[in-house]
Image (spheres, coloured by chain):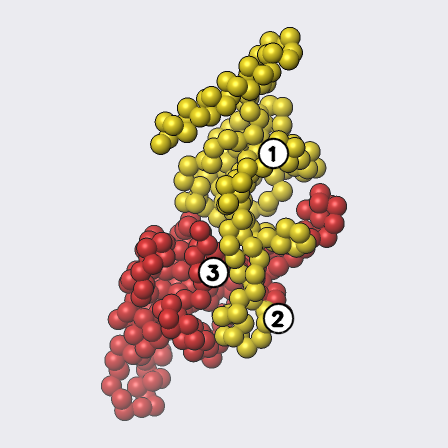
Chain colours: A red, B yellow
Amino acid sequence: MKRITLLLVGVGTLVGVVVFTATTSRPVTVQDAPIFLTQIPAGYREWRFISVAHEEGNLNSFGSILGNDVAIKAYREGTLPFPDGAIIAALHYRFIPSAENNKAFGRDQSFVAGAPTNVQFMVKDSKKYAATGGWGFGHFNNDEKKVDDAFMKTCFPCHQKIKERDLVFTVYAP
Amino acid sequence: MKRITLLLVGVGTLVGVVVFTATTSRPVTVQDAPIFLTQIPAGYREWRFISVAHEEGNLNSFGSILGNDVAIKAYREGTLPFPDGAIIAALHYRFIPSAENNKAFGRDQSFVAGAPTNVQFMVKDSKKYAATGGWGFGHFNNDEKKVDDAFMKTCFPCHQKIKERDLVFTVYAP
């Protein structure tokens, strides 16, 4: 199964390269490799906790941000920029009221994680992702619907707004 | 330092027993041991993520619920009641708007974890905590201000409202 997936990605990349070389005269370089994550980093659900986040409005999301060992170490030691190998995962769920909790408290005040919506990643690789500040961005919907390139191209410009923390908005919660 | 702490706890328990035996004729049994946690379980900040929670109103808290290996395994396998050794931690922070995030999004919609307020625990030990459904409850304020027994006695009656999930409100977020 893994082999088939890798093959499909391989074919996809190849098609991309062919189309690209057919419409430009620029030689194919490493810049033409996908700059966004095509695979979910393995084992992210086992990673340690960084912080929580809630977005109102259209997103209406409830997020938990986790980090792999490299990311957690960098956060705790205040290492900036984050070293290569650091990966930060944002697990997003619907933000929903909890009828059970509200009943226990005797008033409407509780919100919990609803259905999972997507998982986003930032992978630090200063060479591979040099064009986007050393970070590779990934977005994987729970319904497996893929986001398009136009959507993915919005990640870097927004994260650039927090250059002083190496493009990472989330602050470590002690 | 650890030895001193243990000694102090020992002296405290001894004083409690002396006062108790002086005012009643009932023999001292295991029931007279503290039914609430007196020590923060070691290493809880390294545990894996269970879910997130937000309480409005007076609490205005932003919580992340973590579990030790026994708790995570039970959650994932749907084991009820939770086996002895399971520990669930609720890390609470202030629920605050994020000026940084709002600026990046171009509108007020982001909330993040503010200052830590307290950490609560549920420790499963069906013998030690038989009187409170097999769970020992703990509450540790970030400012080290101790909560009194009257406060701690509110844990069990409220958690009893969710008997069908072994007194645990938090549902695992996949």
Mark 3 and mark 1: span between their CA atoms? 37 Å
Mark 2 and mark 3: span between their CA atoms? 17 Å
Please give the name of the residue rendered at 55% of the width and 24% of the height, measured from the top-left corner: B34
**Callout 1, which amino acid?**
Asp
Q: Chain of mark 3?
A: A
Where residue A149 is drawn, which disc sits there? none
Residue denoted by label 2: A58
Give percent across and percent down for residue A117. Answer: 55, 61
Q: Quadrant of the N terminus of chain A?
A: bottom left
Tags 1 and 2 on a common chain: no
Q: Nearer the viewer, residue B57 or A166?
A: B57
Please give the name of the residue rendered at 26% of the width and 77% of the height, measured from the top-left corner: A30
Q: Nearer the viewer, residue A59 or B46?
A: B46
From the viewer's perspective, is the residue at label 1 or at label 2 nearer? 1
Where residue B148 is drawn, which disc sits there? 1
**Callout 2, which amino acid?**
Asn
Please give the name of the residue rendered at 59% of the width and 44% of the height, measured from the top-left corner: B170
Q: Secondary structure at mark 3?
A: strand
Q: Is residue A103 above or below residue B135?
A: below
Where residue A90 is drawn, which disc sits there? 3
Mark 1 and mark 2: span between their CA atoms? 42 Å
Q: Earlier in the sequence, mark 2 or mark 3?
A: 2
Q: Secondary structure at mark 1?
A: loop
